[in-house]
Amino acid sequence: MSDTVQILMSTYNGEKYIDEQIKSLLNQHNVDLRIMIRDDGSSDETVKRISSFANASSIPISVHQGDNVGVVKSFFSLIQAVSLECDYYAFCDQDDVWESRKLARAIELISSEKEGIPVVYCSATNMVNEQLSHLKNWPERPRRQLSMYNALVENVCVGCTMVMNREAMKLIKENIPKHLGEIIMHDWWIYLCVSTFGKVLFDEQSTILYRQHSSNVLGGENVGVISKWRRRFKRFRNGQNYYILSQQAEEYLEVYSDLLDDVRFNDIKEFVEKCKSNIFQRIAYSLTSPFYRQSKIDNLIYKIIFIAGKV
């Protein structure tokens, strides 16, 4: 008997590419598939196209229309609505193309891990343009351990590559954030949760065509190093990313305080407290903080922003 996999997809004005994506989902090999789609208030033909697939497919496709609440709240609505009856769960964007072996490969790697613990699989992507021509592979394999101490300050898991076992979904579903406005992204939150209480797997092999186009809500950066850092500096100068790490950390501490061991609880609590301390305390803490980003330059930038009191 094949493993049962529940795909969770959020859509918004995605009529241009949605057909290709759904066809690639229906073409997944060696899995027993179910698809749950929440439309986030589309004004185009997205719902009509999805409904056409749902009516014609032998694979169960449920379609839920909702108000436009944004990608984070939309995905958490799906998490809250899903049952815990399936073996595995996967997140899906509306404009990519999955290789037919995507889910089977993720399941193979997850099932090789110790049973009974939350496990999340994520991978590199084959970043492509609108015509599906290769741009680059992204992201690179993480250089340091995938742990809570990385996940609190950096996300290395691309949401549309994520596949998790039932234990991981149970962990997330039973501990929904109280203030979703404090969550940076659903995939970042899941990386943080599972890296604390289970295991995160990163696969260097890509099984997804990750489409980049002008309408992307979020996506990888297909730009040079100088342009990338110019964009980041501009966002920082404009205050777009002020306090997002500390706000998410506070929410995480509130939601999981009863489950965290003393060491992790105290480490996160100290991070939150030092974010609000004076500059001399922030400088001292930045030199001994257990939290880290993957690359040396990103880690340095994180410390500088922490000292500036804008984390």
Image: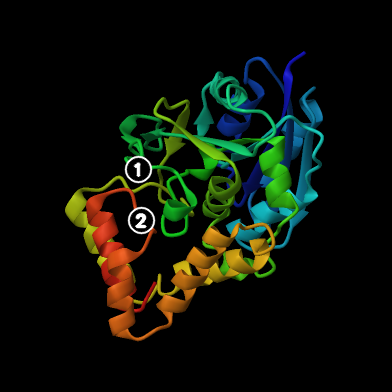
Q: Which residue appears at 58% of the width and 20% of the height? A: 108
- Image quadrant in which the C terminus is located: bottom left
Q: Which residue appears at 38% of the width and 59% of the height? A: 290
Residue at the extreme front of the image, as rendered: 262
> Compared to 162, does 172 lie above or below?
below
- Taking depth in this image into account, of 143 and 225 the one nearest to the observer is 143
What's the amino acid at mark 1? Arg
Q: Is residue 177 left or right of residue 51?
A: left
Residue 277 location, x and y as percent? Answer: 40, 84
> Compared to 247, does 135 lie above or below?
above
Can you identify the residue that label 2 sits on? 292
- Image quadrant in which the N terminus is located: top right
Q: Are the residues flagged by discs 1 and 2 in contact, CB closer than 8 Å? A: yes
Q: Which mark is residue 144?
A: 1
Q: Quadrant of residue 211?
A: top left
Residue 237 in view here: no
Residue at the extreme left of the image, as rendered: 226
Q: Which residue appears at 52% of the width and 53% of the height? A: 188
> Compared to 3, does 301 lie above or below?
below
Q: Earlier in the sequence, mark 1 or mark 2?
A: 1
Q: Is residue 96 left or right of residue 300?
A: right
Category of crowding for the residue at label 1, using alpha-carbon neighbours closer than 10 angstroms: few (below 14), some (14–19), many (at least 20): few
What's the amino acid at mark 2? Tyr
Q: Secondary structure at mark 2?
A: loop
Residue 9 location, x and y as percent? Answer: 65, 43
Residue 99 location, x and y as percent? Answer: 52, 22
Q: Quadrant of residue 4?
A: top right
Q: Is residue 116 left or right of residue 204?
A: right
Q: Which mark is residue 80?
A: none
